[in-house]
Image (tube, grey):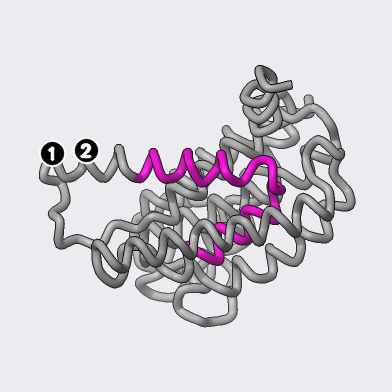
Amino acid sequence: MLNLLFAFIGLLVAIVINILADDLPLRIRPLPPHCPRCAHTHKPLYWLGLLRRHCPACGQPVRPRVIWVEVGTAVLFALLPSLIPEPRNLIVNSFYIAVLILVIVIDLEHKLILNVVTLPVTAVALAASLIVTRDQNTILLAVTGAILGLIIAYIMYGFGTLFFGAGAFGYGDVKLAMAMGAMMGLHRIPFALIIGIILGGVISLLLLATRLVSRRDALPYGQYLAIGGIIMLIWGVEIFNSYIAPYR
């Protein structure tokens, strides 16, 4: 029953993600779901792209991204109660995962990671570290995790600029790493960044090898960091414990 409830919550969250992904990159106040062609505002019953499929005013079909975000978020949220059984951690991590999905969507479409997303979330994560269980985070782990994430990502920014030129790794990625460090704490942020770096490297090589992109194309990296963050929000404590167990 809880899984079905969270699937429904995931659909509602997906509506918000799609709204913010449309409006935040344009620096405009978020508006209710509307048609990108004719600006027709959809009635609440049809805020879900799965229900309307096309604009009733001009017939513009719903963009695939809208559907993918709705389906993907609903499925992932439906699984979260089974993956994160502790209620406090479930609520807080669900919010973080929603934010990271938003980061992925905006980065894929606009190659942007916005301060209006990362900076407030960093502050929220520091406060939320007082709510979750101690194995998840504490205020000390959150502060030091944010600092470590910032330092590691800034070093990556410096090396990326030096060896690959401007744009290889942006300031937005640095601030995202800081926010993720606050979300996950000192003990989990290194793993999240390592997973993101490996994912980014492997997928970029595959895209280059298949000639889907060229070396001149700017490949957004924030999406891979965010995926690493989602993995660590769900399985991070287990990954951390399994890694340090041989050294105890």
Compared to residue 156, the image places residue 237 above or below, namely: above
Residue pictured at 38% horizontal, 39% vertical? 199
Q: Is residue 57 magenta?
A: no
Give the alpha-carbon distance from disc 1 to disc 2, as whole Å: 6 Å
Residue sitting at x 35%, y 62%? 159
Residue flagged by tag 2: what amino acid is it?
Leu
Disc 2: which residue: 206
* Image x and y of residue 79, in percent: 65, 28
**Residue 11 in the image, given as x and y percentages of width and height:** 62, 45
Q: Nearer the viewer, residue 120 or 98?
A: 120
Q: Which residue matches tag 1?
A: 210
Magenta segment range?
Answer: 173-200
Q: Is residue 91 left or right of residue 230?
A: right
Residue 78 vertical placement versus 171 (above, below): above
Provide the secondary structure element on which disc 1 rests: loop
In the displayed structure image, the side of residue 18 where residue 156 appears, left or right: left
Camera-side residue: 122 or 34?
122
- Give left or right: position of 1 versus 167: right
Q: Quarter of the image for the N terminus: give it.
A: top right
Give the crowd class for mark 2: few <14, some 14-19, many >=20 residues within 10 Å. few
* Magenta segment, prevailing SS (helix, strand or loop): helix
Horizontal side of 109 relative to 140 (left or right) equals left
Which amino acid, mark 1? Thr
Q: Residue at x 86, y 39 (%)?
A: 134
Q: Is residue 198 above or below residue 174?
A: above
Is disc 1 surrounded by few (<14), some (14 to 19) or many (20+) residues within 10 Å?
A: few
Query: Residue, x 59% and y 38% (percent of image)?
Result: 74
